[in-house]
Image (cartoon, helix red, strand yellow):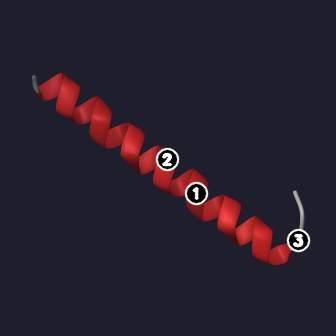
Amino acid sequence: MWARLFTSYAHARILGVLLLRASKNKEEGPW
C-alpha cells in the first residue's frame, strides 16, 4: 500500500514539474 502511495505521489510530482516546464517554455516561445 505504501509503495502505491509513493509511486502515485512521485508520478504527480513528475507531472507537475513537466507541466511547469511546459508553461515556462510556452512563455519563452514554441518548443
Would you place residue 5 above or below residue 21 in this image? above
> Residue sitting at 77 percent across and 77 percent down?
27
Looking at the image, is mark 3 or mark 1 earlier in the sequence? 1
| Few, some or many residues within 10 Å of mark 2 (<14, 14–19, 20+) | few
Badge 3 element: loop
> Residue sitting at 83 percent across and 75 percent down?
28
Of residues 29 and 2, the one nearer the viewer is 29
Say what amino acid the circle numbered 3 marks: Gly
Looking at the image, is mark 2 or mark 3 earlier in the sequence? 2
> Residue sitting at 67 percent across and 67 percent down?
23
Q: Do the CB atoms of the residues marked 1 and 2 lie less than 8 Å apart?
A: yes
Badge 1 element: helix
Identify residue for label 1. 19
| Rendered-image quadrant of the N terminus | top left
State left or right for residue 30 relative to residue 27.
Answer: right
| Rendered-image quadrant of the C terminus | bottom right
Identify residue for label 2. 15
State left or right for residue 10 relative to residue 25.
Answer: left
Say what amino acid the circle numbered 2 marks: Leu
* Residue 8 horizontal/vertical position (percent): 30, 35
Residue closest to the far right: 30
> Residue sitting at 77 percent across and 66 percent down?
25
Say what amino acid the circle numbered 1 marks: Leu
Would you place residue 30 above or below residue 15 in this image? below
Identify residue for label 3. 29
Of residues 10 and 22, the one nearer the viewer is 22
Tell me how far mark 1 sits from mark 2, CA to CA: 6 Å
